[in-house]
Amino acid sequence: MKMPINNNNNVGNMNMMNNNMMMNMNMMNNNGGNMNMNNFGNMNMMNNMNMMNNNMANMNMMNNMNMMNNMNMMNNMNMMNNMNMMNNMNMMNNMNMMNNMNMNPGVSMNNTLTRLKKEFELCQQDSELCQIGCSFGLVNDDIFNWKVTMVGPKGTPYEGGLFTILILFPKNYPKYGPDFRFKNKICHLNVDWRENGVPGNGHICISTLNEWKSTGKVKDKKGFGVKQALFDIFCLFYSQGKDSPYDANLAELYMQNKDKFNEEARRWTKKYAQLI
């Protein structure tokens, strides 16, 4: 006997399968939506990070530019300060020079030049200075820097020697006197020259010269000038100032044995002064 077929059950089963299939598709669609949302979120996060990186880079660039501008500003300020300092120093030096000259600088310089030129010509023509073997010249054509040659007199340890004396005049001459020095070495108690590597500068220790240099005049010697100074130097060839020696060893030799001292002086003259 055949069983009857239940069509209602088959239809129900098919409907259930369709419903399940639709639910699965909806779930897949939902998952796909979630995946799309996640992708959009990730893209937004990456964009935000890129924006932050760009902002930080821009900020760093602005900070570096500000730092460079500040450094340039500081360098410019330092340069201006240095220039102001140099200008102030130059101004102070010029003021000090004017104060030292104690007169209008232009007029005083003209007066000094005129006076030195005249004195130089008078010394060249002076017969008394010629008699003691003096001749005059200028160092590098500088009227403030004289070169005087003097011949060692006969009968002295310096006989036949040709000695050079440098005379350096200050810019404010005659308010202050010149400086006198022996250029070549000479064995004399009152001249700052020594042997054996001991330094010296040829300075001449004579009270009149020192007084004239520091005050511009010599007490009890009115009108003291270059001519009188050169005669005082010439007298050194004949005498030794034992009270004011530069070299204690030479002074001791002079005091103990003058003949031996004179022999030493002649040796120096032959060695350091051109003989004529």
Image (cartoon, rainbow, N blue to C red):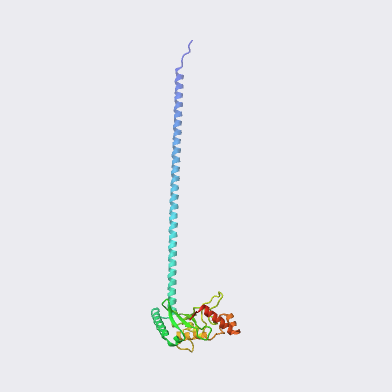
Q: Residue 144: where, in percent of width, then height?
A: 43, 79
Q: List the single residue furthest toward the front.
A: 276
Examine the image and state in which quarter residue 142 appears. Answer: bottom left
Left or right, 94 with respect to 192, comes to: left
Question: Viewer-proximal residue, 179 or 220?
Answer: 179
Left or right, 258 with respect to 6, comes to: right
Q: How many marks?
A: 0
Q: List the single residue furthest toward the right.
A: 256
Q: Residue 121: where, in percent of width, then height?
A: 40, 83
Residue 225 visible in the displayed image: no
Question: Viewer-proximal residue, 105 or 207?
Answer: 207
Residue 35 visible in the displayed image: yes
Residue at 58% over, 84% down: 259
Q: Is residue 51 above or below residue 241?
A: above
Question: Viewer-proximal residue, 128 or 142?
Answer: 128
Question: Viewer-proximal residue, 249 or 143?
Answer: 249
Examine the image and state in which quarter residue 107 appears. Answer: bottom left
Residue at 45% over, 22% down: 14
Q: List the single residue furthest toward the top.
A: 1
Residue at 44% over, 69% down: 86
Q: Is residue 31 above or below residue 146?
A: above
Q: Residue 140: where, in percent of width, then height?
A: 42, 76
Q: Residue 193: where, in percent of width, then height?
A: 53, 78
